[in-house]
Image (spheres, helix red, strand yellow):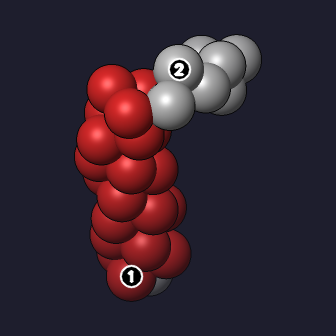
């Protein structure tokens, strides 16, 4: 079952989203998203 793999991807996406949000406020960085 690919449940652990799926959870990993979700975690990475969530982390990237939070990281993106937190840094876009300080440094207006364009992540191409």
Which one is nearer the viewer's eye here, 30 or 15? 30
Element type where label 1 sits in the image: helix
Comparing marks 1 and 2, which lies closer to the viewer?
Answer: 2
Residue drawn at x 39%, y 50% is 19
Which one is nearer the viewer's eye here, 28 or 32? 28
The residue under label 2 is 28
Element type where label 2 sits in the image: loop
Q: Quadrant of residue 23?
A: top left
Which one is nearer the viewer's eye here, 30 or 32? 30
User: Is the residue marked by circle 1 packed among few (<14), some (14-19), or many (20+) residues within 10 Å?
Assistant: few
Residue drawn at x 50%, y 31% is 27
The residue under label 1 is 4
Q: Give the image location of residue 2, x and y in percent.
A: 47, 74
Is residue 10 visible in the rendered image? The answer is no
* Quadrant containing the C terminus in the rendered view: top right
Residue drawn at x 53%, y 20% is 28
């Amino acid at each position: 079952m690919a449940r652990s793999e799926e959870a990993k991807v979700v975690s990475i996406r969530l982390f990237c989203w939070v990281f993106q949000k937190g840094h876009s406020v300080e440094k207006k960085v364009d992540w191409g998203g």
